[in-house]
Amino acid sequence: MKVLFISAAFPPLRTGEADHSLHLCQRLADRGETVHVLTTKGCNDTSHLPFTVHPLMSDWSWTELPRFVRFIKQCSPDAVLLFYIGWVYNYHPMITFVPTICRRLLPGCRFVTMIPFPMGSQNERFSFTTRAIRKAMKWWFIPGGVDWAYGTVLRDSEALIFMSDRHRRILSERNPAVEKKGVIIPAPPLLTMTSAKDEVTREQTRARLGLTSSHFVLVYFGYIYPYKGIETLLKAFHLVSQDRSWVRLVLVGGVHADAYATRPRFAEEMRELPKQLGLDEKVIWTGEFAADSDEASRYLYASDTCVFSHDTGLYLNNSSFAAAAAHGLPIVATQGSFVEEPFVDGQNLVFCQPKSPESMAAAIRRVVDDQELRRCIAKGALKLAAEWYSWEKATDRTIETFCTNSSTNHPSTGLRKLGYQPQAPASALSGRRVYGAADAPSEASQSPPSGATVSQPGE
């Protein structure tokens, strides 16, 4: 099958969206699909990739629509997969009409849209001319069901891939058709897994960070920017380190603050905060790592517990969580406004409240002090990773969306295949649903005092 993957975000751009696009295209190509990628100018050396990259687009605006149409006709794919989140297309509305354009140009082509996060176009940011063209497109493509922020994406995509059931529910309120078209395929780990998992490599990695086997290592993994709760994490670590001085914090990932105009000094502020708290010698920043390197994976294997401090809480779409779970790490994470079905407090992670250093510190202390709890949630995290965050299953489900059988597009069908039991309607979500027995995951430079032994991840 000839598949056209459309994404404005692609390496060398360093974002989760670019990483996901690269990894998914590689997996589709490995399955024997003929993959072509239409992306933004600037993607240069792609000769080593098992698929063809076309870096043709500049700003994804109306002026580039003729170029887009010419390319679609020339490529003539059997299926199109659009990776859509507003910011990577500069919030411009042009791309939101692509499902209808493709289906009119190529009547036999299957069109699927992957929405990693519900963030549409922002038409109010653009000129009167841009908005006028959008209005004309709306009437040309039959006005019924054209969404202000998503154009015809929700209406004319034949399948919609979401990475969290929360996102599907949000967009179902904008267009009821989303309920039947949507499938949930969470993002698997977006990093290169290391094959060096032995104790010697673990200690060598720790030594490079200035750590020894006597330290209990907390790790944060992911891009660092506002809303990731880094301030909360650092303040929580300050509370923990007051009576557990053998604990250290390693932050793995680059700082992306340039896109947040309200916090232009975010990176500097975060670097200064540990100094202000007297933690400078206990907090380690690794910085960015190469996309094709196993460096980040080695850091995760060298750690004892992973902490996710998102201001909005943890959801299935958080690919950094997928990476930590796949490494068999005990995990502490902030709880979202509602808890998605696979997450079970005390079985595959420990929850704390968002934006609360005290709550996070209490959860971290609980995990640091209880070796049996660490073993249990590490085992549960590995089981969760195998069931939900497998690249093999994610690729299978993605290819299934290219089929025309409508039954494969219903969210309940797709979720059951991944072990997910559909929840009650959104209006009934007053709290989390309880697992049935068949659904529940199984239990899987000061020296610490006696009783606070440091165990290896996944032990």
Image: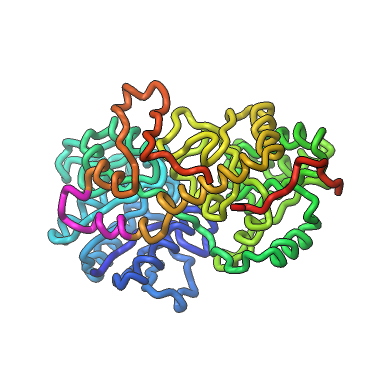
Left or right: 124, with 336 as reference point: left
Residue 367's place in the image compared with 378, above or below, is above
Please name the colour scheme applied to the rendered image. rainbow
Q: Is residue 137 visible?
A: no
Relative image position of residue 212 (x, y in whole percent) = 80, 56
Residue 175 position by quadrant: top left
Q: Nearer the viewer, residue 159 or 209?
A: 209
| Residue at horizontal 24 percent and vertical 51 percent from the top | 99
Residue 56 lies within the magenta run: no
Image quarter where the N terminus lies is: bottom left
Residue 72's place in the image compared with 359, above or below, is below
Q: Main secondary structure of the magenta part?
A: helix
| Residue at horizontal 30 percent and vertical 36 percent from the top | 422
Residue 348's place in the image compared with 107, above or below, is above
Residue 401 lies within the magenta run: yes
Residue at the extreme bottom of the image, as rendered: 47
| Residue at horizontal 68 percent and vertical 57 percent from the top | 302
Relative image position of residue 265 (x, y in whole percent) = 69, 41
Relative image position of residue 353 (x, y in whole percent) = 58, 28
Q: Is residue 392 visible?
A: yes
Left or right: 145, with 164 as reference point: left
Q: Nearer the viewer, residue 417 or 142?
A: 417
Q: Nearer the viewer, residue 158 or 252?
A: 252
Region rendered in magenta:
396-408
